[in-house]
Amino acid sequence: MAIPNTLGRSQANRPFRLLLIKPSHYDDEGYVIQWWRSSIPSNSLAAVYGNALDAAERQVLGADVTIEVTVLDETNTRIDTRRLSRHLRRGIDRQGGGALVGLVGVQSNQYPRALDLARRFKAAGLPVVIGGFHVSGCLSMLERRPVELQAALDAGISLFAGELEGRLDRLLLDAVNGQLEPIYDYLSDLPDLTGAPTPYLPAARIKRTMGKRASFDAGRGCPFLCSFCTIINVQGRKSRHRSADDVEALIRANAADGTRNFFITDDNFARNRNWEAIFDRLIALRASGLEIHLVIQADTQTHRIKGFIEKAAAAGVNRVFIGLESINPASLKGAQKGQNKIGDYRALLQAWHSVGVLTYAGYIIGFPDDTPESIRRDIRIIQRELPIDIMEFFILTPLPGSKDHQQLVQQGVELEPDMNQYDTQHVTTAHPRMSRADWEGIYREVWDLYYSDEHVATVLRRCRVWGYDPKHMLAKLFAFHAPIVHERMHPLEGGLIRRKVRRDRRPGLPIEHPLLFYPRFAVDFVIKYAGAYRMHRRYRRILERVMAEPDPLAYTDIAMAPVVADERETLQLYSAVASA
């Protein structure tokens, strides 16, 4: 693995080497989840890297110190701690410089891996800091410090809570002076993003992801109160946003590297108070010949915001992720997701399709009233009555930093102690109506229910009417179905060609003998990719049948039918449960 220093250093200057790592997490066998090409780039990593480049340019450590920044994403790059530690130590021991290792954007499921990496760097005599949503969420919502955070402090590893803008200078100065604080807590002081350094990753990093897509946050904060969400308790409920000038600058910087696809990571871009000015600027950029494509996240009320959907499409949005979560009003009310009203779902989805934007819907499995039977029923209703293109499913998980988690801790409810399991694919607490086996079983089953051969054909027929290329739609359907079936991983955690390093296994688990590990890995690889190949062949046959159907524009179904006043008397969406 090459160690890419992004900034040069003159012979006269002392180096300060800043190593930024976005950790992955462990699979069920304890191996690091890593791909030849990972799914999407980390915005947290891009945001910290952008701030680091700004600090280096301003020479915050003095004119005689050059800050060299290395940025690595473990989901697509092996983290060789020994080699990296030697490189950092050389700058200290031979050149009189300094170093800091930052574990960036660490989510709860990534925290065990982050702590393992941090301990190795610390053992090499290097200063280390861990930041991200797990640290911030725990310090924001819990009265007592969790054992895993205390373990880091006991090992001499620093913790960073809050956002980095305007705070990196102090962190770097403390590191170069050997005076890192145990905890940096900025949760009560959220920075203004106007004029702040913008997220950026080198083109070489982005090329290691599928789709060569960059990510950035145009704003932070969400006004809603969803009880399972950590965003509002870390980034706040007030909209803080970048200016249109800032967004244009980062778009142009990435475009200069050849990147034209972007994922705007705002948890809810519709509640970014500057959405219109940003869209208008992006529309102007596209009119000038800069072809860009965007994926955004937005709530279920966007069709009620005048001009939002139309301007989104004109600005280059071709996919929107919507947190549908459930079609049971009682479940939505219990999760304090009052902005989701099932009576709006059809009008919302049809509004996005009317401007040529694909709809991705997130759906949560495991609300208190859920049972395997009710979930199967709900999926049938969704397939029949809601014009959703892609669905992705999540197990209801009390993530540290959420109100759900805070309340369960206060009530003394037993929770899964292993943070590696908090990936929304594993059960982490008891359910009132389902056993652990039933809950995890229906979670696996629901992907096959939605992506059935019959419904894949239905989605392809709909997309022909809406004017979207069926071949491209087929690729997206396959990309969301195959990972959960053949890799047993959520598609957002998936990638292209799984990599496993024999020695990169979770501490406490045995390192397998080469004569056992490599043959087993090879057999497993063949079985998985042969299964994926057969699935793709099956999908292709479905596409061929659909493409052979005459008069495709004549196709219609209940989900595509215009919304009418009396449909609440006829659709199961409004009658399946009492609360509807």
Image (spheres, grey):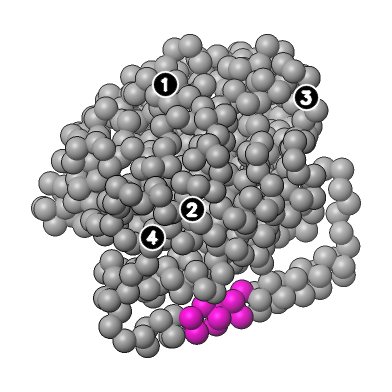
**Which of pointers 2 and 3 lies earlier in the amino acid sequence?**
3
What residue sits 45% from the left and 29% below the top? Answer: 338
Which mark is nearer the camera, 4 or 1? 4
How would you rate the neighbour count of disc 4 (Cα within 10 Å): few for under 14, some for 14-19, many for 20 or more? many
For marks 4 and 1, give the CA distance: 34 Å
- Magenta: main secondary structure equals helix
Q: Is residue 560 left or right of residue 524?
A: left
The disc at residue 413 is 3
Please name the amino acid that badge 2 sits on.
Answer: Gln
Pointer 2 or 4: first along the chain: 4
Tell whether label 3 touches label 2 (CB within 8 Å).
Answer: no
Amino acid type shown at disc 3: Val
Q: Which residue is mark 4?
A: 559
In the rendered image, residue 215, in percent from the top left (x then y), is placed at 39, 45
Specify which label sits upstream in the sequence, 2 or 1.
1
Q: Nearer the viewer, residue 512 or 551?
A: 551
Dot 3, how many residues are within 10 Å of its Cα: few (below 14), some (14-19), or many (20+)? few
Per the image, the residue denoted by label 1 is: 237
Which residue sits at x=26%, y=76%?
Answer: 553
Q: How many angstroms separate mark 4 from mark 3 (CA)? A: 41 Å
Residue 30 horizontal side relative to residue 170, left or right? right
**Three-letter residue code for mark 4:** Ala
Give how far apart the Cα atoms at labels 3 and 1 are: 27 Å
The segment highlighted magenta reads 532-542
